């Protein structure tokens, strides 16, 4: 079993140093509490509600920034020394563009960087979209797939991560609050089905608090491959934690003659990619 | 608004005449209660738990069978004379094969026949899978997409129906009962997300009762485009009914700058179809 923890944090827009410090403290606490994989919200280093691209650029960093060396050091502090951090940051690309990105960091450093492909609403005015599939990173605990927030609402994207072999999907998010009277937030309901149809657990780390008029869903949770929310943070500062059998994700059999992946008909799915 | 009714029936395996009579009575009752679109369970004319292909063949019919003329007559009995029936039957193909099919019938007769593509478990030993996309049929109420039961669990398939313009997805089902302590049935949770990510209402008609050792989920329900189960039959004989604004399904906008379909990245989805 692998202990997965998703952190619900409250970054402050523009406060790179303070955000770094708060995230590091929460990551350290998660590892010292026994986590092996820690998921940190989207744009945890920078905040979210930027006025424009230039403001985002001012708190954007490259994957060689020392904050990731700090995350690597924290990963080595995990009980087994084999911790993994998946966390969101505002990335300054070598091409000068600003991306809404997530890094996968283990004790050796940055293993992968994913640039959010499906940009939500005004993010389109701030960030450049990525153009690569969600990475699936081999770790000692299993293969960790990564995407960010609104990406999760595209079943094509979660499917591609599962088909690429993800044993766990780690999803840094910032979910602006919407109305959902009597129901779980839409994003959680979507994650539940994505876990079910792919038999893949999903850990999403949301933020809390207010920022320039935006409130957040505070929906940090972990969904089992059976589509059950097995842990959630609730409102405010907190975290979700679950012990997951990640290697069990590799068995996609539903019954003697039914199989989630073998029953797919990719020969008939061409319209998805047109 | 369009009144959509999904019927929860209990076909008897092998009893073509009796099943026909019971389905016709329930369809007639739905139309006289104000329905415009009526969804009938999977294999409602034949029953489900066949011993083998030959037993299924013995109660399979062609789309020119008089039971569909009866459904057409019932469709003309709708209050506005413009009723539509979507119902499951065991189809004898011109090629001699047996298909798990659904017909879309209006007052003019059979408008489309869909052959289930994703066959569940032992269905593979009884039926030949279809090889065509879910039909989307233009009706006076809006465009009705059709698929059957396990098809719904493939997000590729619900997406294709939505991309083809379905304003409503009608899903004849026979859901064998599974454990889901404290949660809605998995199939309903999957339908909720399919409705949300495609902003498309979904009406599924399940069966009830027992058949050769199989119990059924009795999960007949209607899901709104907001991913809310707005009506459900509950256990036993019954139906789900909802008034739906089907044309609203055509607006896929989530916010000023977010759009469920325009935000898709089909250029990056090729792996789905491989």
Image (cartoon, coloured by chain):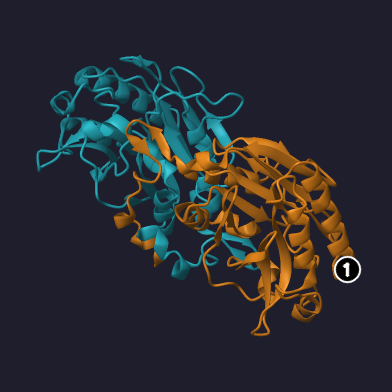
Chain colours: A cyan, B orange
Parent chain of label 1 = B
Count how many numbered circles sit on residues in the image. Answer: 1
State the residue position of label 1.
B17
Q: Is residue B127 left or right of residue A86?
A: right
Using the image, determine if residue B187 lies above or below residue A81: below
Q: Is residue B248 above or below residue A196?
A: above
Q: Position of residue B59 (x, y in %)?
A: 81, 75
- Quarter of the image with the C terminus of chain B is bottom left
Q: Dividing the picture into quarters, in which one does residue A189 lie?
A: top right
Q: Is residue A226 visible?
A: no
Quadrant that contains the N terminus of chain B: top right
User: Where is residue B203 shown, x and y percent of the image?
Assistant: 65, 47
Residue farthest along the bottom direction in this orientation: B95
Decide: few, some or many residues near mark 1? Use Cα within 10 Å; few <14, some 14-19, many ≥20. few
Q: Secondary structure at mark 1?
A: helix
Position of residue A53 in the picture relative to residue B248 (left or right): left
Q: Quadrant of residue A64?
A: top left
Q: Where is residue B195 drawn, in percent x and y?
A: 54, 43
């Amino acid at each position: 079993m692998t202990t997965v923890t998703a952190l619900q944090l409250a970054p402050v827009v523009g406060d790179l140093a303070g955000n770094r410090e708060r995230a590091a403290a929460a990551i350290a606490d998660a590892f010292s509490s026994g986590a092996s994989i820690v998921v940190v919200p989207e744009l945890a280093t920078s905040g979210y509600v930027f006025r424009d691209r230039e403001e985002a650029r001012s708190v954007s960093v490259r994957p060689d920034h020392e904050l990731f060396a700090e995350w690597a050091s924290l990963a080595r502090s995990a009980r087994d020394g084999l911790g993994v951090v998946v966390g969101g940051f505002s990335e300054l690309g070598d091409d000068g563009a600003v991306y809404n990105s997530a890094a996968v960091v283990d004790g050796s450093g940055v293993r992968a960087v994913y640039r959010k492909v499906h940009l939500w609403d005004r993010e389109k005015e701030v960030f450049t979209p990525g153009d690569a599939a969600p990475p699936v990173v081999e770790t000692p605990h299993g293969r960790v797939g990564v995407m960010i927030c609104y990406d999760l609402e595209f079943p094509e994207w979660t499917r591609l991560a599962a088909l690429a072999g993800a044993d766990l999907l780690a999803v840094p998010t910032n979910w602006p609050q919407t109305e959902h009277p009597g129901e779980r937030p839409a994003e959680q309901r979507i994650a539940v089905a994505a876990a079910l149809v792919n038999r893949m657990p999903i850990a999403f780390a949301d933020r809390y608090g207010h920022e320039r008029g935006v409130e957040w869903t505070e929906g940090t949770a972990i969904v089992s491959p059976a589509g059950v929310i097995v842990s959630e943070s609730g409102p405010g500062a907190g975290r979700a934690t679950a012990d997951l059998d990640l290697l069990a994700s590799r068995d996609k059999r539903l019954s003697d003659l039914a199989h989630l992946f073998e029953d797919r008909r990719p020969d008939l799915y061409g319209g998805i990619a047109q």
